[in-house]
Amino acid sequence: MDSEIISDSLKVVAQEATSKSSDTSWLMHHILDGRELEFPPFGVIHLPELHLFGLDISITKHVIFMWIAVALLVVIFKLVSNGYKKSIIPKGLTNLVEVLVVFVRDEIARPTIGKGFEKFLPYLLTVFFFILTCNFLGLLPYGATATSNIAVTATLAVISFLFIQVGGMMQNGVFGYFKGLLPHGLPAWLLPIMLVVELLGLFTKPFALAIRLFANMTAGHIVILALLGLIFILQTYVVVPVSVAFALFIYLLEILVSLIQAYIFTMLSSLFIGMAVHQEH
């Protein structure tokens, strides 16, 4: 299966690199968002360009793959729901999903949020499975990784930011929440400085979430394409075994990275929520 994926990737890279052996713009073409979907049986599918009140709301390939991710998750969880109706003991897909759900609940939400974690668990499960599905879709031939788009990761980070602030205010009150940001016992002259520092800290957390996911999901794909592109840029068969072997290794590593990045985004979101809700800790 992995060799077939690498073979398909080679064909994609070859089409671009052979005609532009000295130009690396073909590499970014496969990383950045666009208004075209490339499917060999159907050729290139041009996506519609839409505008609303002067804003560009065109459908792009990253949007398409986010829709695919959502559709897959709806189907998967419907099958899981039906599985529980047939048998109390989970099997197959139902068992796999339950393992992931229990992992997020017991290893992420419960330890980092503590008391009252149940209120935030639906969001954490949603963001975990959505990021994981988008990451895996990007590993398919001719696929696109929506989580390598800074707009997507920034939107997810903003949603986490809202959950953090709302959770903290619901637990401590609006005034109590912002008062709790400042350490106790500070000299009066330090209060204005620390207030600015803590307010900046509120915004650096979602910024770190967005950049971390975006950078890690983009880097792996760039390395794979660059390794395969060496074959056509150097125009020699000597580097073929090395390029393909290293590309396959990075591809397998990307599977692990996809899992880790979904975990890290969910864990950090949960950790920040816990810090906001239980400020006394």
Image (tube, rainbow, N blue to C red):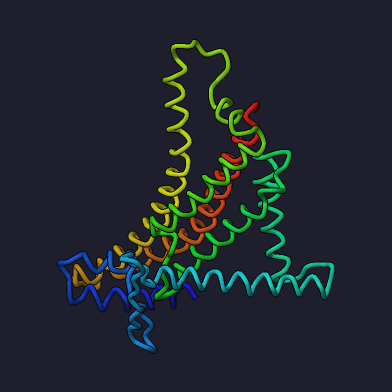
Seen from this angle, which residue lies furthest front? 53
Q: Compare residues 228 and 183 and report the one nearer the observer.
A: 183
Q: Is residue 50 above or below residue 267?
A: below
Q: Quadrant of residue 102?
A: bottom right
Image quadrant in which the C terminus is located: top right
Which residue is rendered at x = 22% and y = 66% of the image? Answer: 25
Left or right: where does residue 186 sit relative to residue 83?
left
Left or right: where does residue 77 sit relative to residue 160?
right
Q: Compare residues 186 and 270 and report the one nearer the observer.
A: 186
Residue 182 visible in the displayed image: yes
Q: Residue 247: x and y, percent? A: 37, 64
Q: Residue 194: x and y, percent? A: 45, 22
Q: Quadrant of residue 250?
A: bottom left
Q: Residue 45: x and y, percent? A: 35, 83
Q: Residue 56: x and y, percent? A: 33, 67
Q: Compare residues 3 and 90 and report the one nearer the observer.
A: 90
Q: Is residue 36 above or below residue 192?
A: below
Q: Compare residues 261 and 34 and report the one nearer the observer.
A: 34
Left or right: where does residue 24 sit relative to residue 188?
left
Image mark count: 0
Residue 242 visible in the displayed image: no
Which residue is rendered at x = 49% and y = 55% of the image? Answer: 257
Which residue is rendered at x = 43% and y = 69% of the image? Answer: 63
Q: Is residue 245 above or below residue 121?
A: below
